[in-house]
Image (tube, grey):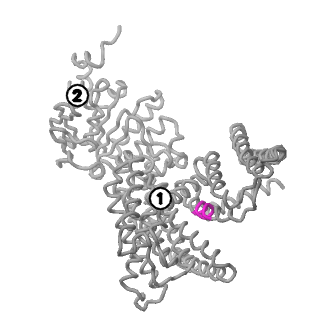
């Protein structure tokens, strides 16, 4: 019924002798919440880095909306509509919350350098527009009251949400979240869950997320791929994954009675 | 309506800047001697140089230490052109200067592009080494080019000494970079400074941004070089050594990398400081030693006091004044005791000889007390001044 948005076809990434990702393929459909799980070192983040163009796949190809993006640069890929967050938060630490989001929104509303040099009326208008867009995104993640604080002074959970707002400010079709709930307390991850649902429902964003918090993933995701030491172990709906003996053995473990 | 007003206001500001520069030139020429005039001119050039380096180092976070090279490229471009067109082809001096400035800026900007494109992919120390090397390469290259006089230097005709143009360039340089930072475009540069990978992840073309900053910075340095060449009327490679690069870098660091206001303040004060120190009277070894001890005491007490009392401005001010009092007291006390030793009392240093020592000591002290630079991230703005005034008024009213 839905078209596939991101297609990862038989990709491998080798770092010298280390095969971080081997022959992994999956398909993400539009407006889907897709989970990528697996034990540490399974190659999940490497997969992210490959999709966003930080690494080039050694074999195979990644295509987005039918266009091959495996050789494109990071900024081109963002422009096509893929945005990401990082496992260890990477904010612009000396800038304010608002500036963080504005810096991302600028690729959809570029300001010409000459305009900026002359502080032309157009540049002023565009800056105002950037600001209002950024504030809209901060409202979505519930940070509009903190817009003037320096981003590194925010508590952890809010930094995570700010990073999501920053990624969303590039108007992506596909959002990649690298362990968004890591280190969060239950309240914070509850808020995050709502934010992610809102992104999907209100903004038609497709979301691919890596997460170790199984409750979080199983609640949220519609489809899950399990990676183990670089290989795809299983794929399917949360219910199937939970029961899959291979996944249970490699990652989930047997529940204690 | 609003737009028209802003444009008109801006026109007036520009006119005001021109008039101010011109008035300053007239004032300096009327009341100053040739030495003071030269200092004012060079201070203007240093302001341009440090602000333009700040765009590269402080705002975009690329550690470049070869800024003198672009200054030199600008100066020698103009010098070479003056060989080709010896009588400035009948243009009046100001339009000729403007033309030369443009040509020099383009040449230096192009050089910046050529150097920047491959080397800005490097990070931190590596970029520093490349720019340092480039600076030396340019200087030595010019030293061995007979067309431009080699190490003897060359005359640049005509000699045009307009203080107003020099300061106008400084103001334009400050204005352009301030404007960029006031719009959303400025965030692109600061984003690259804060985190390159995160910048790339939100679609900022990192290399392009770095090269842009580098080209802009070197273009302004080139324009300053053109003015320098015409101001001096004579240039040698010896005027563009590594020392100059480091001096500019020091200005940026002392002023607070990232703060344009800081660069301006630091450029003027660091340029004037060694000149001002020339006039110092001779001092005895005793008082010199005690001054060194006293600055040690100053740093010590200040850091101790700041550790304890840092909550509000009032406490900070009292901590600083306490440190000042303690160190001054210590200075007099230790001078008294040191002068009991006859050797220390009778040995005299010439103020002039000590000036570089004192200059260096001041830098060391400054970096120890304020590693983030004098003004760190502060920018002077009308809004800030208005806020300060209203805040003070409010405080005064509440006090009454």
Is residue A131 at least partly visible in the picture?
A: yes
Q: Which residue is mark 1?
A: B242
Which residue, as the protein is rendered here, is positioned at the far top? A257
What kind of secondary structure does the magenta stretch mostly adopt? helix
Is residue A128 at least partly visible in the picture?
A: no
What residue span does the magenta drawing correspond to?
B264-271
**Mark number, residue B224:** none
Crowding at dot 2, Cα within 10 Å, few <14 / some 14-19 / many 20+, comes out as: many
Give the image location of residue B268, x and y in percent: 61, 64
User: Above or below — where is B180 with respect to A26?
Assistant: below
Q: Nearer the viewer, mark 1 or mark 2?
A: 1
Which residue, as the protein is rendered here, is positioned at the far bottom? B90
Give the image location of residue B292, x and y in percent: 71, 47
- The residue positioned 38% from the left and 48% from the top of the image is B126
Q: Quadrant of residue B270?
A: bottom right
Say which of B86 and B16 sits in front: B86
- The residue positioned 80% from the left and 50% from the top of the image is B345
Q: Which residue is mark 2?
A: A230
Q: Is residue B269 magenta?
A: yes
């Amino acid at each position: 019924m839905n078209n596939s948005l991101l297609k990862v076809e038989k990709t491998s990434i080798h770092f010298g002798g280390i095969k971080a990702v081997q022959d992994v393929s999956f398909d993400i459909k539009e407006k889907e919440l897709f989970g990528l799980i697996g034990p540490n070192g399974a190659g999940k983040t490497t997969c992210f880095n490959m999709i966003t163009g930080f690494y080039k796949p050694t074999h195979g190809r990644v295509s987005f909306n039918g266009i091959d993006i495996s050789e494109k640069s990071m900024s081109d890929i963002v422009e096509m509509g893929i945005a990401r967050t990082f496992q260890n938060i990477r904010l612009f630490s000396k800038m304010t919350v608002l500036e963080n989001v504005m810096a991302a929104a600028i690729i959809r509303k570029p300001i010409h350098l000459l305009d900026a040099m002359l502080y032309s009326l157009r540049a002023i208008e565009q800056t105002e527009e950037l600001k209002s867009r950024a504030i809209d995104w901060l409202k979505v993640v519930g940070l509009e009251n903190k817009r003037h604080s320096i981003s590194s002074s925010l508590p952890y959970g809010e930094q995570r949400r700010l990073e999501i707002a920053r990624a969303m400010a590039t108007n992506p079709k596909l959002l990649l979240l690298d362990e968004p709930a890591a280190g969060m307390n239950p309240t914070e991850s509850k808020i995050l869950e709502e934010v992610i649902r809102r992104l999907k429902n209100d903004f038609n964003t497709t979301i691919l997320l890596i997460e170790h918090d199984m409750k979080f993933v199983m609640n949220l995701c519609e489809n899950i791929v399990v990676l183990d030491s670089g290989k795809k172990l299983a794929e399917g709906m949360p219910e199937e994954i939970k029961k899959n003996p291979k996944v249970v053995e490699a990652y989930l473990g047997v529940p204690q009675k | 309506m609003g737009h028209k007003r802003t444009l008109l206001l801006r026109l007036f500001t520009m006119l005001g800047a021109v008039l101010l520069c011109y008035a300053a030139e007239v004032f300096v020429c009327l009341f100053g001697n040739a030495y003071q005039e030269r200092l004012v001119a060079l201070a203007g050039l240093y302001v341009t140089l440090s602000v333009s380096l700040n765009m590269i180092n402080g705002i975009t976070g690329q550690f470049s230490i070869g800024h003198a090279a672009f200054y030199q490229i600008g100066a020698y471009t103009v010098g070479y052109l003056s060989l080709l067109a010896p009588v400035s082809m009948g243009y009046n001096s100001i339009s000729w200067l403007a033309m030369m400035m443009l040509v020099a800026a383009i040449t230096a900007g192009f050089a910046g592009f050529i150097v920047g494109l491959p080397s800005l992919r490097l990070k931190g120390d590596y970029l520093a080494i490349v720019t340092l090397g480039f600076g030396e390469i340019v200087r030595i290259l010019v030293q061995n080019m007979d067309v431009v006089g080699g190490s003897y230097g060359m005359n640049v005709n005509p000699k045009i000494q307009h203080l107003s143009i020099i300061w106008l360039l400084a103001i334009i340089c400050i204005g352009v970079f301030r404007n960029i930072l006031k719009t959303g475009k400025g965030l692109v540069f600061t984003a690259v400074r804060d985190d390159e990978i995160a910048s790339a992840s939100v679609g900022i073309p990192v290399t392009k941004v770095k090269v842009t900053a580098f080209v802009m910075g070197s273009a302004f340095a080139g324009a300053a070089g053109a003015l320098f060449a015409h101001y001096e009327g004579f240039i040698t490679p010896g005027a563009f050594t590594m020392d100059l690069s480091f001096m500019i870098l020091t200005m940026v660091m002392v002023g607070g990398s990232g703060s344009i206001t800081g660069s301006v303040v630091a450029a003027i004060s660091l340029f004037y400081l060694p000149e001002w120190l020339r006039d110092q009277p001779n001092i005895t070894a005793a008082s010199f030693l005690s001054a060194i001890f006293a600055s040690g005491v100053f740093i010590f007490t200040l850091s101790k006091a700041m550790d304890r009392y840092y909550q509000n401005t009032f406490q900070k001010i009292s901590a600083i004044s306490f440190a000042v009092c303690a160190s001054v007291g210590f200075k007099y006390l230790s001078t008294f005791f040191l002068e009991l030793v006859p050797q220390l009392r009778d040995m005299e240093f010439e103020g002039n000889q000590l000036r570089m020592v004192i200059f260096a000591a001041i830098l060391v002290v400054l970096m120890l007390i304020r590693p983030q630079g004098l003004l760190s991230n502060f920018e002077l703005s009308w809004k800030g001044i208005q806020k300060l005034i209203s805040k003070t008024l409010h405080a005064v009213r509440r006090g009454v």
